[in-house]
Image (spheres, grey):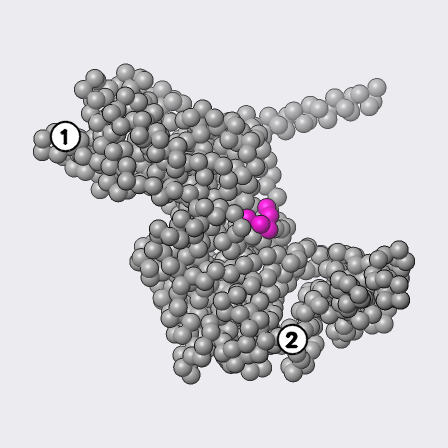
Amino acid sequence: MKFLLLFALVGVLATTAARLAAADTASFQQQLQSDLRREVERLHISYAAERTRNQKPSDLYTPYLLSGLISLHAKTGEAALLAWAKDDLMWIVRSALDSNGRATPFFGSSFRFLPTFCDAYLYLKSHGSLSATEAAQVAEQIAANADARIDRADFGAQNRGLIYGAEFLFCAHAVPDAPNAARWRQNGEALIYDSLHGWSVEDASIYEPFWLNYVLTLSEMRGDLAEQMKHITLRYHFDQSKELLMPNGLMPDWGDGDWTHSWMWYFANWTLAGSHYRDGTFLEAARRLYDANHAYYKDLPAEAVGALGIALRWLDSTVPLAPLALDKSAEVVDDLVSKKIVFHGAMGSYAMFTYRDEGPFGRFTRDYQNAQLAAYEEKPHHGHADENSFAMLMQDGTVLLADGGYRAAYARGWRADVFHNRIVARTGFPPEGDVFGYLMADPTYHEVQTEKIHFGTFGSLDYARTRLVDDERGYTGDRITLFAPENGLTIVVDSLLIDRAGSKVFSNTWHPDHILAKGDNWVVSHPDRIPIRSEYWPNPHTRDLVIEFVSNRDKVAQTRVIDRRFNPSEAFLQYLNNYFFKGQRLTFVTVLRPIAAGSFVPALLNDVKLLTDEHDDGRTLGLRFMLGGEPVTVALKLDQTIGLTNLRGRPMFDAATGAVSYGALRTDADFAFVRERRDGTREYAFQYATALTFAGKTLFQQPVWDAMFQGPGNFAVPDRRDKMPRWHEVIPATVR
C-alpha cells in the first residue's frame, strides 16, 4: 500500500513538474509574442516617411517585416497587423513600378527575400485583404523577380544554390498561372536537390543557419516537412549548432562569420527542432540565445523580426523546457563532417576548436564552386583556412581569443590561415625580419586533409589530438590540446613531421587582439571589444589571457599589428624558418592561461616545464605543471610508431620497446598523466597503453594474452599484452 501511495505521489510530482515546465514554455511564447508585437509596430512606424512618399525601402531587410506581421496575426487575429502587412507589401510593389506602371524587380540581385514576400501575398489574399487589382500587381512583381533570376544556377548544398531554387518554387507556388511558372519549377527542383539530400558543404556560422532555415520553410511549403525532419542529415545540423552554444548564450563565429549575426535563424531552427522532436533542450537553447541577443540589440532588426515570426509559427508551447547540459568537453556530433571539439570547464570556461577540412562529401558541389566562384581565399564553400585552430576561448563571460571574422572587401578578407589561431606554413625563405609579411603574401586557400586521432575526458585533464596533412607544403602536423576543466588552463602542443625536404617557414600564430603586457616569449592580453563589421560588442573585463611559448630553442617570437576583423589587431607568433630534411620533427608548446583581470605575476611563467631536454629529437614530450597546488606530470608520445616492430608481417606493438620515461612517469601510452594529490591519492589516465608506472610503482598493466596473434612462431612478441584504448582512475593512498 505504501509502495502504491509512493508511486502515485511520484506520478503527481512528475506531472506537476511537466506542467510547470510547459508553463515556462508558454511564458516564453508570451514573451516572444509580446516582443514581436512591439518590434513590428516600431519598424512599421519607422518606415512611415518612406512609405508615404512611395520611396523604395532603404532597409534591404524590410520584406522580413512581413513575416513577423502575418505570423503574429495568425496567432492573435489583431486587425491592425493585417492592415500594416498590406501597407508594407503594397509599398514594396508600388515603389518598384516604372514610369509606365510596369513592375520592375524590386529585389534586383538581392536574394533571400522572395519567399517571405510570397508568403505574405498568399496570406493576405486568403484573408481577402487585397483587391483584384492589388493582387494582380503583387503577382506581376513576383513574376518580374522570378523571371529576372532565370540566369541563376549557383547550385549545390550551400546557401545561394538552395535559396535561388527556393525562390523559384515559392514564386511558382504563389503565382502558378504565370507564363514562366513551369520553368521556375524546373529551375527550382534542379537547384534544391543537393541541399535536400545531404549535408551542407558550408562551414560558416552566418550561412549554415539560414541555409537550414530555407530547407525547413521550403519543405513546409511543399508539404513534406515531417518527412524531411526524419533525415539524419537534417537532425545533424540541429544537434551540431546546439552543442556549440556558449555559456553566455551566444554562438561562436567560425568560417565566414560575425560575432552575433544570424542568431535569429539558429533561434527559429531550434524552435522547430524542439517542437517537432518534442525535445525541450532545443527550446531552452533557443530561449538562452534569444535572451542574450535581445539584451544586446534591444531594438531588433527586420531580419530578426522575420525569423521570430517563423519561430512563433513553429513553437509548440506544450513541449516543456528541459535543462541544457553543456558543461563537459565533447566532440561536436562527429569527426567526419563537423570536425569540431568544444572544451567546457568551471567559471564558464569555453574553447571551440575546429579541424574541419573540405571533407570527403559533396564533391559535385565542391567542384562546381571551385570552378565558378572566384573566391580563392576560401574552401568551397565559405569555409576558411582554419583547420586545427581555436575559433573561440572565453572564461567568465570574457572573450579571450576570437576567430578571424568575415571580410573587409571582396578578395581582401580574413579567410587565410594567417588570420587564425593555428600553425601557419609556407615554403621558401622569407626576407629576414619580415616573416609575417611573407606569410600574408599568400592568402590563397591550399587544400589540406584533417582527421581526429584521439579525444577523451579524464577528470583533471581533457585531451584531444588532431592531424593535418599538407601535401603541398610537405608536412604533417598534430595539434595536441590539454585542457584543465577546473581553471581553464590550456596547453597546446604542435608536433610537426617534415614529409618533404626543403626551405620552409612555420609560424605558431595567435591573435590576442589587444596586448596589455609582454616579454620575450609571453604576452598578457584582453580584447576590449569584439568588432562586428560596423558595430562593436563590448567585451567584459573579468579575465586576462596569458599566452606563453615554452619550447623556444631556435625559435623567434614577435608581435605584429595587423588589420583583422575590420580593426587594428595585435598578433603574437613564434616561428622557425630553415631548410628542413625529410623525417625531421619540430615542436611548438603554447600555454594559454586565463587569469583574473589585473592579476598577472611573472611567477606564472615558471609553472609549465618541459621534462625532455631542448636537444631532444621531437619524438616524445614530457610536461610538468601545477593544478590546484598539486603537481601533474604529462607524457606525450609524439611519434606514435615508437614501440612498433615488424615481425614477418604487419607492424606489431610491444610494451617493452614502446615504453618511454617522462621523469617519474613511464608508459607506452600515446598520452598519459599522473596527478599527485595532497591526500596521498594519485589520479592517472592514459590513451592507448599497455602499462603505466609512476615513481617505480605499477599503476596499470594489461595481463598477458597468450592467444593474441602478435607474429608467427619464433617471431612472436614475447610479452603479449593488448593495448587498452583509454583509462582513468584514482588510486587510494592505502593501495600505494
Horizontal arrangement in the rendering, residue 82 relative to residue 426 (left or right): left
Q: Position of residue 249 (x, y in %)?
A: 50, 46
- Over which residues does the magenta segment extend? 333-338
Q: Is residue 79 above or below residue 249?
A: above
Compare residues 140 and 365 and report the one nearer the observer: 365
Q: Position of residue 510 (x, y in %)?
A: 49, 67
Q: Specify whether residue 510 is painted magenta.
A: no
Check disc 2 and report the residue beneath it.
618
- Residue 259, visible in the rendered structure: no
Horizontal arrangement in the rendering, residue 455 relative to residue 57 (left or right): right
Q: Earlier in the sequence, mark 2 or mark 1?
A: 1
Check disc 1 and report the residue beneath it.
102
Q: Amino acid at mark 1?
A: Arg
Q: Which residue is at a point 21% across and 22% down the rendered structure image?
A: 136
Q: Which residue is at a point 16% across and 37% down the rendered structure image?
A: 55
Specify few, some or many for label 2: CA neighbours under 10 Å numbering under 14, 14-19, or 20 or more: many
Compare residues 117 and 57 and report the one nearer the observer: 117
Q: Provide the major secondary structure of the magenta segment.
A: loop
Compare residues 563 and 237 and report the one nearer the observer: 237
Q: Is residue 357 above or below residue 544?
A: above
- Residue 729, visible in the rendered structure: yes
